[in-house]
Image (cartoon, grey):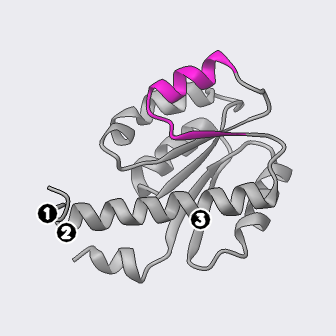
């Protein structure tokens, strides 16, 4: 069964970020988290392909990418998001924009303003992955306890 994946295997985080320094920072911030596997995409299109192929537990998505913007990435992944197969957190240098509002309305879970802090990333990723694991366990268990 897939419950072995929940308990034993690493949880996967996909970071879609075009700036190498920002990607290195995220990688360093996640390095201390046990059981977290990081996938990297440097363009929106590569990120969409990786997300669809790998179904990561969490996607950290830069809103400004060189090929397609973060909003378009969320649009292309909206079916997986609505099926709760993907959880997306937006990363943005803007305090709040219409694209963030639109992406949130399409199912993005949260947004984190840049510059990111290690505490924000570690705590946020830990909480998001715990929630994903709990949802997966409820789904696999049939949800009988709460029904």
For marks 3 and 1, give the CA distance: 26 Å
In the image, residue 70 lies in the stretch drawn in magenta: no
Which segment is the magenta one? 97-112
Q: Which residue is mark 2?
A: 141
Which image quarter holds the N terminus?
Answer: bottom left
Q: Are marks 1 and 2 in contact (CB under 8 Å)?
A: yes
Residue 91 screen position, x and y as percent: 69, 40
Asked if residue 39 can be seen in this view, the reply is no
Comparing labels 3 and 1, the label whose residue is closer to the camera: 1
Badge 3, how many Cα within 10 Å: few under 14, some, many 20+? Answer: some
Which one is nearer the viewer's eye here, 78 or 45? 78
Residue 22 screen position, x and y as percent: 81, 50
Q: Residue 123's image quarter?
A: bottom right
In the image, residue 109 lies in the stretch drawn in magenta: yes
Q: Which residue is mark 1?
A: 144
For marks 2 and 3, give the CA distance: 22 Å
Residue drawn at (32%, 81%), measured in percent from left and top? 4
Residue drawn at (35%, 42%), measured in percent from left and top? 80
Residue 102 screen position, x and y as percent: 53, 20
Q: Which residue is mark 3?
A: 126
Task: Identify whether 69 is placed above or below 146.
Answer: above
């Amino acid at each position: 069964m897939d419950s072995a994946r929940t308990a034993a295997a690493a949880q996967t985080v996909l970071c879609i970020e075009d700036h190498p320094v920002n990607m290195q920072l995220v990688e360093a911030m996640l390095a201390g988290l046990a059981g977290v596997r990081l996938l990297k995409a440097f363009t929106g299109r590569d990120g969409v392909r990786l997300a669809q192929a790998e179904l990561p537990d969490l996607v950290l998505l830069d809103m400004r990418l060189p090929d397609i913007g973060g909003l378009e990435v969320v649009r292309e992944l909206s079916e997986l998001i609505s099926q709760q197969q993907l959880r997306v957190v937006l990363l943005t240098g803007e305090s709040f924009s219409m694209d963030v509002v639109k992406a949130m309305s399409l199912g993005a879970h949260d947004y984190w303003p840049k510059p990111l802090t290690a505490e924000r990333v570690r705590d946020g990723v830990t909480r998001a992955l715990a929630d994903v694991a709990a949802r997966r366990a409820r789904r696999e268990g049939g949800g009988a306890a709460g029904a």
